[in-house]
Image: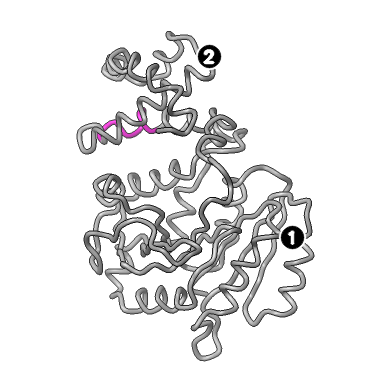
Amino acid sequence: MLITVFTPTYNRAHTIHRVYDSLKNQSLKAIDNKPIFEWLIVDDGSSDNTKELIKQWQKEADFSIRYLYQENRGKIHAMRLGIENAQGILFLSADSDDAFLPETIETFYNTWNNFSDAEREKCGGIDVLCLDQNGEKIGNDYPIEHKMLPTIDIIFKWKYIGLGETWALLKTENLRKSFVIPEEAKDLKFIPESFFWNRITIELQQYSYCINKRLRVYFTNEGGNMSQDIRLKYPDGFLFESQWFINHYKFVFYKEPKAYMKHFIKYIIFSLHNKEKFLNILNCLDGIWLRILLVITYIPAILLKDRYLNGIL
């Protein structure tokens, strides 16, 4: 099996058909009667008719559908379960309210097949772009395509060029190494997914291959101001991410200071939101120079706090 298409879901019986319909309509499903992809669903404790819907699709579909159920623990735990059970060499995460174009699997298959063995070893992901539900482009094109580039450069140097929503086919073995919830965060229901993408990018030092094709359909304006809702609902997860980043990736300060300082300000904002005392905020930092940076950025973070938490920044 080359690709596991993975969908974590929670009470999305009304939208998950978008993924099913997208897979049904793929232009390439098998080569020499051997399936190219499977669809793996992890249900994070849904109380709607998701399970019954999937059972019906399993009877109808001309591709493999696997369904796993867990008690409600949050998306990151659902993703970890999916990664552990994936049979594909490559892993494509499709949210339960997403759709994608009929040529998606064929594009990924042909791109991967055209790589040399050395390129496959080097490549951690194939990156594409998105459309909205009206067929309009989301964001700008990649400035460089059809070339292996260090993922860390793409993540940090292209962060502010207006790419918008992107989508990536990733190596399953890399996810198994880096999409791991640290022991001290086991009880958190939510950690931003960027925490895990940063671990893959920074710790594994893989390369990415970018294509200026828009294959994913990202449905906009369906859930209100999610940034605001999530930030206020799960401050502990955001605090954990930023504290980990500034303590573990100090070298990023020299490579991409803007990205590093953004996490520093977020660390202060969520600490203040959680009513942490100044000395406690200070003592959680690993090293004297981080504590000096904290003192320097403390007042600016206070001034930005309400705007950030309310989703304005």
Q: Residue at x 42, y 77 (%)?
A: 109
Q: Residue at x 57, y 62 (%)?
A: 6
Quarter assignment of residue 76: top right
Q: Is residue 249 magenta?
A: yes
| Residue 122, x across and y down, in percent | 29, 62
| Residue 125, x across and y down, in percent | 37, 61
Q: Secondary structure at mark 1?
A: helix
Point out the tag, 2 or 1, that comes first from the N-terminus. 1
| Residue 150, x across and y down, in percent | 25, 54
Q: Which residue is mark 2?
A: 275
Q: How is the image coloured?
A: one colour
Q: Which residue occupies the foreground of this view, 245 or 98?
A: 98
Q: CA distance from mark 2 to mark 1?
A: 39 Å
| Residue 123, x across and y down, in percent | 32, 63
Q: Is residue 305 above or below residue 97?
A: above
Q: Residue at x 53, y 38 (%)?
A: 191
Q: Name the disc covering residue 76, or none.
A: none
Left/right of residue 96 with respect to residue 113 in the rendered view:
right
- In the displayed orientation, state which residue is furthest to the bottom: 32
Residues at discs 2 and 1 in contact (Cβ within 8 Å): no
| Quadrant housing the C terminus | top left
Q: Which residue is mark 1?
A: 50
Residue type, mark 2 in image: Lys
Q: Which residue occupies the foreground of this view, 265 or 288?
A: 265
Q: Residue at x 49, y 87 (%)?
A: 31
Query: Which region of the structure is painted magenta?
Result: 245-251
Q: Secondary structure at mark 2?
A: loop
